Image (cartoon, grey):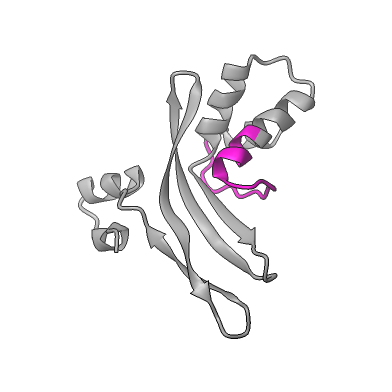
Amino acid sequence: DMLQAMNTGHDGSLTTGHANDPRDFLARLETMVMMAGTELPERAIREQISAALDFVIQLSRFADGSRKLTYITEILGMKGDTIASQDIFRFKQTGMSEDGRIVGKILPTGIVPKFYVDLKQKGLPVNMSIFRET
């Protein structure tokens, strides 16, 4: 039902799910659709998922109990029978604080998301530097 609602042409949906990383979330979502008893072929389910989602934003809980943004992943559509995606930002652990907390930051992968390119082509001001690897 959620995927059908997200694919009705109305922009602006948000949902949550539990998985280890964005690729795992996509596989888990596919499994949930199959478990719902729909008689759709796997490819059709993947096409619905790839059409419904633009991004997967991953928050992870670390061994120290903290939760951190670990991935911003863009969904690109289908490539063959697979949902294509690309990580735009990833968390990098840089160490531990004196009190045992995980230290790190979310860093760009160097990939510019496709919607940003579209904005630039439409003449809208965009700051491409936020996507440069540091």
Q: Is residue 35 above or below residue 109?
A: above
Pick the quarter of the image with the N terminus.
Answer: top right
Q: Residue at x 44, y 18 (%)?
A: 80
Of all residues, the one furthest to the bottom in this rendering is: 98
Q: Is residue 94 above or below residue 59?
A: below
Q: Nearer the viewer, residue 54 or 11?
A: 54
The answer, for residue 90, to whether it is visible in the render is yes
In the rendered structure, the answer to whether residue 65 lies left or right of residue 104 reads right
In the rendered structure, the answer to whether residue 35 lies left or right of residue 30 reads right
Residue 63 x/y as whole percent: 67, 65
| Residues shaded magenta | 9-27
Any magenta on residue 84?
no
Residue 103 x/y as whole percent: 52, 74
Residue 88 x/y as whole percent: 40, 51
Q: Residue at x 57, y 85 (%)?
A: 98
Q: Is residue 31 above or below residue 127?
A: above
Q: Main secondary structure of the magenta part?
A: loop
Q: Is residue 55 above or below residue 51?
A: below
Count the labels in the image: 0
Q: Nearer the viewer, residue 50 or 106?
A: 106
Q: Residue at x 62, y 18 (%)?
A: 42
The answer, for residue 126, to whether it is visible in the render is no
Q: Nearer the viewer, residue 9 or 46?
A: 46
Residue 22 x/y as whole percent: 56, 44
Q: Residue at x 67, y 36 (%)?
A: 28
Quadrant of res 128: bottom left
